[in-house]
Structures are given as structure tokens and as C-alpha cells.
Image: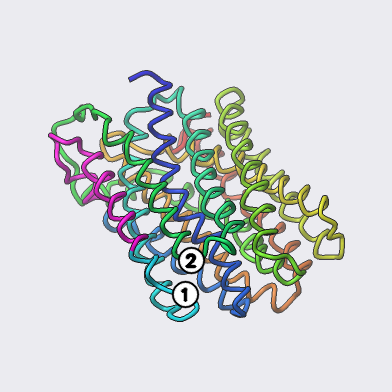
Amino acid sequence: MTPAGKLALLASLYLAQGMPYGFFSQFLPAMLREQGVSLEGVGLASLLALPWALKFAWAPLVDRHGLARFGHRRSWIVPLQLLTVITLLALATVEPTVDLQAMLLGVLVLNFLASTQDIATDGLAVTILAPTERGLGNGVQVAAYRLGMILCGGVLLILYPWLGWARVCQCMAGAIAVTTLPIAAFREPPPEQAERPGLAAFTEFFRRPGVGSWLAAIAAFKLGEAFGVGMLRPFFIDVGLGLADIGWLTGTAGFLAGLVGAMVGGAFVASYGRYRCLFVFAAVQALAVASYAIAAAGARDGWVLYALCTFEHFASGMATAALFTMMMDASRPHTAGTDYTIQASVVVLATGIGSSLSGFSAAEFGYAQHFLLAAVLCVIGVLPAVLHHGKVRRGETELASVM
């Protein structure tokens, strides 16, 4: 398969993942806050992403089992995306203002399906991308994911007052059905190794030298950002912005900037090295999160909010592309789904903790102090990566050892 073909296939798969997650992480917080849910409640709603943090528990099963005739990864991805379409159509029959619990349960199911699809997709990406293609590949991955979030976290938020809940769910279902076509037509090559990894792959990963320092590095790297931006949409609601305004600001302009940032970050990683980019992007990410304190302090003109949001999303896109490239480097090809999923689960667990605690911080200290505190956590969060880099330089670990 040509490099362009690989990137196009992965773009469609990560676009499909980004749509339900954009709906959950961008659309839902703003809608809940508009309905009067407390800041603490909005923050705790992020726990619906728990399947993304726990997916490591069933990742070895996805790595081991699959239909070779249909394609090992493909035999998971296609059915899971079709189940996502069915779930969204079922959610269209639920009225969230009447039965909030049923709606939240449906979102939990969507996160379970998307997180399981992610296991198979990440495994496919690791196996088909050569090491020299991973920087650009992860740029495309993050960009496509963010494009999905734009569509379902921004565009649908803008259109929600006119479309209503049912049409929003139906639009998402139709879009995900379309993204299923490329993987359905894909002919997956057979695995290089006939042996299929079992549950032992899980324990083998944790016995690798340097695993503790590496997992600490990826857990800490995005925690501060998640802690900060977890209260961004409630902040915009509280300063008087409507859902459509937030859709244009974060879900469209912001995520377009994130898309560009991911592509730029992926290209820089390939040209200038993994660790150098990771450290520089971490500093830019911390500065971007701190900049939201300017708006919280009173500078709330439209151009200011757009500038701050664009800056933060661009920085986040670059940092995420660098981190994901290094996570792919740390994955073994024959257990790619398990290895990458363990790392991704650690990241999601850490960011979920940060998001779930963000409401308590904003309620206690106010928005300005909350964003500054989050920036401090971003700076502290890069220190474990610095320590792991030292281990790599001393030859103590091969995890994420590509410089």
C-alpha cells in the first residue's frame, strides 16, 4: 500500500473516532452547563470516558482474536463502527431534557465502542506505518481526529438550536457510516507472525526496562492541559456566550487550529527529533493554557477569545502529535494493539482525573487562578519525560528510544 493510501485510510478511521468523542467532550459539557448542571457535575461527567482509560483490559483480546479471512484488525473495526451507527440512531429517540440518565448511558456506550475500535485502529497503524512515516502519520491521525471533533463538537453545536437532538444524532450516524467505507474496501495484509499474542502480552509490556518512567512521562504530559481546559466551555457559558458562539469559537476555529498544529507538529517531529519537539511543545502548551487567564481577568472581546483559543488548540495539536509518535515507537509490532492501548489508557486516565477535578478548582479559586494553576501543572508535567530521556541516553531503556 502506498504511503498516501495508508494516510488516507488512517485519516478515515481516526475521523470516525473523533466524531463521538468531540460530541462527548465538546458538545456535552456546554449543553449540560446551559441546562444548569453545576461545575462539579460538568467536571464529573468526564468520567463517562472511563472506557478509554480501561480499554487496556480487553486490548489483548483484540490483539489475539480476529477473522484472518476478513482481516484481523478489520474484522473488529467494521462491526464496531456499524454498532456505533446503531447506537446513535437509538440515542436519537431519547430526549435529554426528559431522560438525562438514558442519554448519559448512551454516551457511555458510544465511548466503549469507540475506545475498542481505537485498539484495533492503533494496532493497524503501528503495523502498516514504517518508523520514518510515523511522524507524519501521527500528524494525520491527530488532525483527522480533531476534524471529527470539529464536525461533532463544533459544527453540530452551532446547528443544534435548529436541528434539535434527534437530527444531531442522525447526522453523526450518517457521517460515521460514510467513514466505514474505506476500511470495508481495504484488504488487510496477513500478520508477519503466525503466533497470536495472548494475555501474556499485557504482563510482558510491564516487564520491559524503563516502563515505569515512560508511563509516568505520558501520564503527566497532558494532565495539566486537561485540568485547565476541562472548564473552558463552562467558562464561556458563564461569561454569556451561547452554544452557537462556543461552537464557532472552540469547535470550529479552535479545532481547525488544532488540526494545523497536529500536521505542523508531526512534520517537526520527523525533521527535528522526538524529544526536542516534545520539550519545546510542552513549554508552548503551558503558555497557551496560562493565556486563558487573560480572558478570565476581563479581556473578553471576540478577537481576544478567538486568538487565545486558536493559540491553545494549535499548541495542543503539536504536543499531541509528538507524544503519540513516541507512544507508537514504544509499541512492539506483534502486540501493537495492546502496547499502544496500555499507553493510551494511561493518558486518558490521567487526563480524565484532571478533567474531573477541574470543576472543583474553578469553583474554589475562580477561573483566572484555575487556568494559571493548570499552566503550572503543565510545566511540572514535562519533568518525568526529562527523566525518561536521561534513561534513554544512558542506554537503560529502549522504550521511546527514537531520538
Magenta region includes residue 106: no
Q: Is residue 150 left or right of residue 79?
A: right
Q: What are the residue bounds of the magenta stretch?
A: 60-89
| Residue occupying the point 53% across, 29% down | 403
From the image, tell me which residue sits under label 1.
96
Label 2 crowding class (10 Å Cα cut-off): few <14, some 14-19, many 20+? Answer: some
Question: Which of 137 and 234 lies nearest the eye of the viewer?
Answer: 234
Closer to the camera in the image, 30 or 98 = 98
Q: Quadrant of the N terminus?
A: top left
Magenta stretch holds residue 80? yes
Quarter occupied by residue 242:
bottom right
> Residue 209: x, y in percent?
39, 43
Q: Please name the colour scheme applied to the rendered image.
A: rainbow
**Residue at point 66% right, 59% down?**
244
User: What kind of residue is marked 1?
Assistant: Pro
Mark 1 to mark 2 CA distance (whole Å): 8 Å
302 vs 373: above or below: above
> Which residue is the site of mark 2?
165
Q: Secondary structure at mark 2?
A: helix
Residue ranking furthest to the top: 2
Seen from the viewer's position, the closer of residues 130 and 394 is 130
